Image: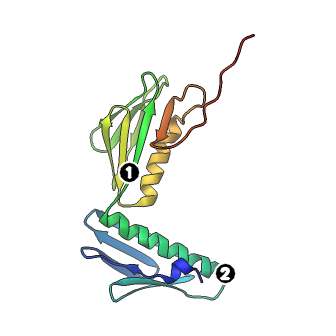
């Protein structure tokens, strides 16, 4: 069995965890997250901790105990602290603008602006017209929204124009040379 899977997840104060069969719901000050897990694992709440054990004895169940425990730990962390991804937009005329609370208007050098509908449970704020902050309680959704926004105009290697996640390194290439 996974070494990570053997460690119980400690439930902090102000966090409520409910297990219904293979579905786990975690509710806290930053929001509510719910996920369903495979039948290869048993999930129980025992004395203020979440314990994940394998239901069957095979290799898949061994792997799933560690995976399920890690996901549940991320859910607990998400509803207490939250997750944040920062995006940078670089390029002449490249900018972002919020239209209401759930629509992001991106101007990324195309002939038209890109209208991105922000999913429920995710909050996007603008530090400036070129710096975005994606926040939420669900680690997967925060990463998915950041990746979706980045996919509209990934950084190109010659001039460095595009959308990047803050701190991401993009190898720059040298342009054509004339003799």
Report helix, strand or loop for mark 2: helix
* Label 1 CA crowd tier, 10 Å (few <14, some 14–19, many 20+): few
- Compared to 44, does 150 lie above or below? above
In the rendered image, residue 154, in percent from the top left (x then y), is placed at 54, 36
Q: Dot 2 corresponds to which residue? A: 59
Residue at (64, 78) in percent of width and height: 60
Q: Which residue is mark 1?
A: 119
Q: Position of residue 54 (x, y in %)?
A: 56, 86
Disc 2 or 1, which lies upstream in sequence?
2
> Which quadrant does the N terminus fall into?
bottom right
The figure's colour scheme reads rainbow
In front here: 28 or 12?
A: 12
Q: Is residue 21 above or below residue 129?
A: below
Residue 110 image offset from top left, x and y in percent: 49, 25
Taking the image as shown, residue 159 lies to the left or right of residue 85, namely: right
Q: Residue at x 28, y 44 (%)?
A: 101
Front-most of residues 16 and 47: 47
The numbered dot on residue 94 is none
Callout in the foreground (2, 1): 2
Q: Is residue 141 above or below residue 88?
A: below
Residue at 34% x, 40% y: name it: 103
């Amino acid at each position: 069995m996974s070494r990570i899977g053997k460690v119980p997840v400690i439930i902090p104060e102000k966090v409520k965890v409910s297990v219904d069969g293979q579905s786990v719901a975690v509710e806290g000050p930053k929001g509510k997250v719910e996920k369903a897990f495979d039948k290869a694992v048993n999930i129980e709440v025992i004395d203020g901790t979440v314990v994940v054990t394998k239901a069957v004895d095979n290799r898949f169940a061994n792997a799933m105990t560690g995976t399920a425990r890690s996901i549940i730990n991320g859910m607990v962390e998400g509803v207490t602290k939250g997750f944040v991804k920062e995006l940078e937009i670089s390029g002449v005329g490249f900018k972002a603008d919020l239209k209401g609370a759930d629509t992001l208007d991106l101007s990324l050098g195309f002939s038209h602006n890109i209208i991105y509908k922000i999913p429920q449970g995710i909050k996007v704020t603008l530090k400036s017209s070129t710096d975005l902050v994606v926040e939420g309680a669900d680690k997967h959704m925060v990463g998915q929204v950041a990746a979706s926004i980045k996919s509209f105009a990934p950084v190109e290697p010659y001039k460095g124009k595009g959308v990047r996640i803050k701190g991401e390194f993009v190898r720059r290439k040298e342009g054509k040379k004339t003799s």
